[in-house]
Structures are given as C-alpha cells and as structure tokens.
Image: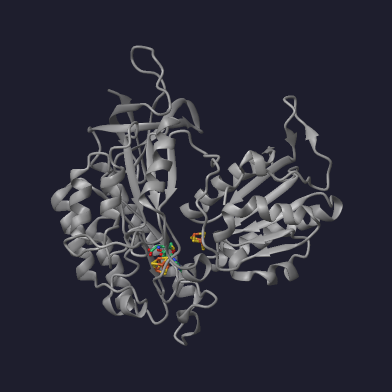
Amino acid sequence: MAKNDPMSAPTSTLQSAPVPAADGTPVRGRYWITTFGCQMNKADSERMAGILEAMGYTPGSDEHSADLVLYNTCTIRDNAEQKVYSYLGRQAQRKRDNPHLTLVVAGCVAQQEGEALLRRVPELDLVMGPQHANRLDTLLTQVESGQQVVATGEHHILEDITTARRDSAVCAWVNVIYGCNERCTYCVVPSVRGREQSRLPESIRLEMEGLAARGFREITLLGQNIDAYGRDLPGITPEGRRAHTLTDLLQQVHDVKGLERIRFATSHPRYFTERLIDACADLSKVCEHFHIPFQSGDDDVLRAMARGYTVDRYRRIIERIRRRMPDASITADVIVAFPGESDAQYRRTLALIEEIGFDLVNTAAYSPRPNTPAASWPDQLEEAVKVERLQELNALVERIARQRSSRYLGRREEVLAEGVNPRNDQQLMGRTRTNRLTFFPAQRPDGSSVAPGDLVTVQIEETRPFSLSGSLA
Ligand code: SAH
Ligand code: SF4
Ligand code: F3S
C-alpha cells in the first residue's frame, strides 16, 4: 500500500481549522514527540515525525503548547512505564482546557495496556502499538473523524516509503528486523513487539543508499536480536545454510557509496557466529564495536533466564572478537537481583565484568513485568538487595570503563564529527570507531572549521570513563 503518496494524502482536517502556510500547504498545527526507551523507539519516533510532517504538521517548540502530543513509550522496567503515566497526567489536565489537543500514546506501553489505557486516561485520542508506527496517518484520520482509536492488533509491518525526520544529519538508524522470537523469562519485548519480521536486503540497501545520498555518513542497523536477521526469509544457499543472515546483509550493503561507517545492535550471544566476526574484521566500514548483552555471569541464572548460552560461550565469543580485532570495544547489558539470584551468583557477574573489561555496561535491577514467567516466581528479592547490588555494580562498571578509556590517552583516533557540544559551542562532538564519545575543537589549527559529517583525526589528551577529549591532529 502506498502511504503518504501526495495523491492519497488525507484531506480531512483536525477539529481546529488548518492555517495555510505561506506556500499554500495546509498546516495542521504543531506536534511534539517525547521518546522513551531503546533505539527501536527512537527510530520509530523519527518515522512518525516524518509522517506527521508529510501530513502538514510542523515541529513544536515545547510539549505544553503543541497541538498534537505523542508519547512513544517503553515498558522494559516498571519505572519506565510509571514515567509515562506522570507525563500523561499533565497532558490530560491540559486537554480538559483545550479539547483541540490531540493526545497519542505509541510504543510498548500502548501495546501492553491497549484499551486499559483509555480507561485510565479517557482524554487519549489514539493508543497505538509499535507495529502500527508506519500507519500513524491512517490512524490519525480515524481520530479526526471523531473516534478514540486503539491499534494494537498483530500487524505485518509495511515497508515505510515516507521519509523519516532524522534527529541527526550524520548518523541514522535503519531497522533490519522487527520483533523478537526469544522468550527470556524476564522480558516484555516479545509480547509488545511481536514476532520477528525481517526486511528484505534490497529494501534495506535502498534505504541506505537514499540516506548516503542525503549526506548521512554512519548507519546503525537495528534489531532486538539482530543475529536473528533473515531467519524468517526464504532461501537456502548451495552449501545448505540459510540465504539471509546478518553476515550476508553486511556484505550486501557494505559498498553503499558515501557511507563511512556501519554499526549494528543488539547482538545475542546464543546466535553470534564466527563468520560474523570474520566479516566485521574484513569489512572496513563495519566499526569495531560490539554490543552483546550477557545479563548474568552465572550459568544457573542464565538458564533460569532462558538465555540459551553459558558464560563460557560468552567468553569464547569475546576472545574470538579480540583475536581478530584486538582494540574492539565491548559493551553489554546486565540484570542484577533476578529472582533467586544468590550473593555468590551476583558476585560471578561482577567477576565477569572485571575479567572481560567492558567499555560500558547498561545495568538494571530486575523488575517484574506483566505476562513474563519470572514475574510470578516466588523467590523475588527485596528492594534493598536490588538497590545495594545495583550501586556496587555501577561503581565497578565505572571503574572498568575508566580503565578502558585510559588506553586512548596519547593515541590518534578517527572521529566522525556529529555536531556541536551542547555544553561548549567552541567544540564539536563525535565518536571513535569504537563508539567512545569524543570532544574536540570546532576549528582546525589552520583556522578552517570542521563540519558535522567530516572525519577528523583527534589526538586524545583527556580521558573520562565514558568520554574523551583532544585536539585536532
Ligand atoms: N534484545 C536485547 C535487549 C532488549 S531490552 C537483548 O536480548 O539483550 C534491553 C535490556 O533491558 C536488556 O538487555 C536487559 O538487560 C534489560 N531488561 C529487560 N527486561 C528487564 C527486566 N524485567 N528487569 C530489568 N532489566 C530488564
Ligand atoms: Fe528480550 Fe530476550 Fe528478546 Fe532481548 S532476546 S528482546 S532480552 S526476549
Ligand atoms: Fe522499551 Fe519497547 Fe524498547 S519496552 S526497551 S521501547 S522495545
């Protein structure tokens, strides 16, 4: 189905009369999107912003004066979900004084709660799950006809031919697989994001070519479990393996002209292959950064989580990566205080972090989630244990990150300039190939300015746990 084709653009208007712009195009009003959660949600928000702009909305300057407010929500942990309700409470209040306000809840809380959200916040106009992001225009048209709309049914995700409104002009996300077929016992993602749906390599490549032509220099390929890419697509190679894998995809998109860097996330240790490691080492645009959550350093906890690998398998993956790419950065996610986790098991997680030497670890205390097995297990740990473990863990993560950062001191690093440092407009910021945030002067020694999108060499003079700074070499 063609979406946002100018020929089929919705012509109905919101309750408030549209104001024509100087060039005659109708202006629907100002929109505001707040995004919670992961990169998938950020990518969805960019596409939804593109759809709103194609419909005639313009970006608003703040959430309290916008005509359409969209919260793209996350429910990975209880605190993420609760945050949404407090934001919604304020908007519901505003809607009572301003009935023309359009209130939308998208994303994972919308999918999880569905109709129940309307009962909780009757002021809502639209509740839409992540699989419906590309249908925002159709759904808003229904809202305009006076309905309250809930779109949370299982849905085949349509190829999106609209132009996303990207937050960056240099780095872009490209979804390659939606959903997740794993059943990690703590995780709400499969129930809110649905079954895996891989995009065709040709569509992915086409989108990447379009982005490169518009000046983007770096692309991050996205999937909740990106190693699953292609397993729902048909085809077997003459050697008997499946025709579409992440490795094949990287090889197929690597020569897109104009791109400097390709990244991908998130990797799953159960499916991560040696073939992929070799491809990353051999393909020059693929950056030496691997985000491979390990979740726990204890085999019994991993089994209870249904993760499908052992700590030893995880170690071997990292060893292989480092054998081929000695300077690669390794980042991960970890959960502490999973139901039944003993002190000794928790200490194995700390030990693994020390042993591997992670560049960064996203940490979380276990949070019971609706419709997940672990939430109903009897051996839940107390809040105090969660807090204590998380604090100790965070201190360790920072100490290790500081050590890892210090290896850059005195080195010359290739940095892709992304934009101005919001805290110092004399500086730009960008990232190393290994994804370390790096600050450097906006002007070269010869007086010329560095522009976002330029690749520069930075002589690293200062290191902090999660960032670097230096001068232009
Ligand atoms: N697909 C990725 C992660 C998706 S969710 C993977 O398989 O690793 C992002 C992170 O949130 C997870 O890696 C996990 O560390 C954390 N997380 C997920 N569910 C959680 C829960 N119930 N409580 C605490 N942290 C959780
Ligand atoms: Fe959640 Fe596991 Fe899927 Fe990751 S792989 S999204 S943790 S179920
Ligand atoms: Fe959150 Fe949904 Fe992402 S629950 S982490 S926004 S997939």
Q: Is residue 103 left or right of residue 324?
A: right
Residue 95 position, x and y percent, is 81, 54
Name the colour scheme.
one colour
Image quarter of residue 230:
bottom left
Q: In this view, does 121 lie to the left or right of 375?
A: right
Is 90 situated above or below 299? Answer: above
Instruction: Name the residue at the top extreme.
Output: 446
Residue 96 position, x and y percent, is 84, 56
Image quarter of residue 386:
bottom left
Is 107 situated above or below 29? Answer: below
Q: How many labels does the image show?
A: 0
Quarter containing the C terminus: top left
Residue 120 position, x and y percent, is 73, 69
Residue 396 position, x and y percent, is 33, 59
Of the pair 388 and 302, the residue shown nearer to us: 302
Q: Is residue 282 left or right of residue 389?
A: left
Is 190 situated above or below 358? Answer: below
Instruction: Name the residue at the bottom extreme.
Output: 378
Q: Residue at x 33, y 77 (%)?
A: 301
Q: Residue at x 35, y 59 (%)?
A: 229
Q: Residue at x 82, y 49 (%)?
A: 100
Of the pair 51 and 83, the residue shown nearer to us: 51
Of the pair 236 and 435, the residue shown nearer to us: 236
Instruction: Name the residue at the right extreme.
Output: 97
Which image quadrant shows ligand 2?
A: bottom left
